[in-house]
């Protein structure tokens, strides 16, 4: 009689809804990884293989200094990061963290170079503006990251909790069944 119960238990566990893990993967960006930009851009785009639910964070740096951006916009599989100031010559990194359709956070960095965008005078003026904006933006991003980290801890993966509760309930039912059965 134990064998049929184990088969039924295994069948029940198999039929439980399974979580689909289809993390969004970056398939293209403009500018692309390693590209050299020779004309200033107003926005950068990131294209993923599946829908993006939300943008957690985007950060653009040039030669290690933060570049001001507006909030990023999501349209299906595309995330657009709008720049709040002109691009300058230098080595850029566009870091991102997004929530994919399956609810998981994914992120990475796209690196590229900008050359021939600014003259020497306007380049140093813009670098000064970048440095002054950096402190403001870094403080805002640190505060936002701390808030999101706290929210993420509170909203941890409920799938594991539900699965654990189902397993515990099944084990309790099995113990009660076998205990009741021995009394007969």
Image: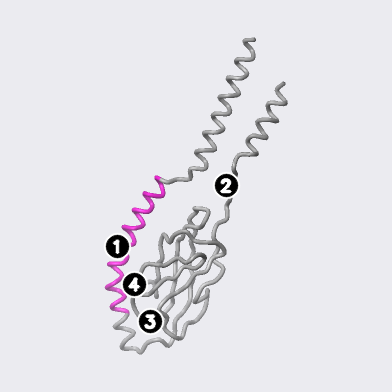
Sequence-wise first label, 1 or 3? 3
Give how far across and how far down residue 68 sits, in percent: 34, 72
Sequence-wise first label, 4 or 3? 4
Left or right: residue 157 compared with residue 87? right
Q: Quadrant of residue 183?
A: top right
Give how far across and how far down residue 139 sits, in percent: 29, 62
Q: What stretch is highlighted in magenta?
A: 127-154
Work out whether residue 133 or residue 55 is closer to the camera in this orientation and state it. Answer: 55
User: Is 145 inside the magenta-drawn segment?
Assistant: yes
Q: Identify the residue under disc 3.
A: 88
Quadrant where the N terminus lies? top right
Q: Identify the residue under disc 2.
A: 19
Q: Identify the residue under disc 4.
A: 68
Given contact means CB atoms under 8 Å apart, are the residues at marks 2 and 3 in contact? Answer: no
Q: Which of marks 4 and 3 is in front?
A: 4
Sequence-wise first label, 4 or 1? 4
Using a 10 Å C-alpha cutoff, classify the residue at mark 3 as few (fewer than 14 neighbours), some (14 to 19) or many (20 or more): many
Using a 10 Å C-alpha cutoff, classify the residue at mark 4 as few (fewer than 14 neighbours), some (14 to 19) or many (20 or more): many
Q: Which of marks 2 and 3 is in front?
A: 2
User: Is 128 inside the magenta-drawn segment?
Assistant: yes
Residue at horizontal 60 percent and vertical 15 percent from the top:
180
Above or below, 2 relative to 145? above
Left or right: residue 175 compared with residue 39? right
Q: Identify the residue under disc 1.
A: 139
Quadrant where the C terminus lies? top right
Using a 10 Å C-alpha cutoff, classify the residue at mark 1 as few (fewer than 14 neighbours), some (14 to 19) or many (20 or more): few
């Amino acid at each position: 009689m134990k064998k049929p119960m184990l088969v039924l238990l295994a069948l029940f566990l198999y039929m439980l809804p399974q979580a689909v893990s289809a993390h969004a993967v970056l398939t293209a960006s403009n500018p692309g990884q390693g590209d050299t930009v020779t004309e200033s851009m107003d926005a950068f785009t990131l294209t993923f293989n599946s829908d993006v639910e939300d943008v957690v964070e985007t950060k653009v740096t040039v030669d290690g200094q933060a570049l001001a951006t507006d909030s990023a916009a999501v349209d299906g599989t595309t995330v657009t990061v709008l720049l709040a100031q002109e691009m300058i010559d230098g080595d850029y990194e566009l870091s991102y963290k997004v929530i994919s359709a399956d609810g998981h956070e994914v992120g990475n960095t796209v690196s590229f170079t900008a050359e021939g965008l600014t003259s020497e005078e306007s380049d140093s003026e813009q670098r000064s503006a970048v440095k002054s904006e950096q402190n403001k933006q870094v403080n805002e991003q640190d505060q936002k990251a701390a808030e999101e980290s706290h929210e993420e801890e509170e909203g941890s993966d409920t799938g594991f909790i539900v699965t654990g509760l189902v397993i515990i309930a099944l084990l309790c039912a099995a113990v009660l069944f076998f205990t009741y059965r021995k009394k007969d």
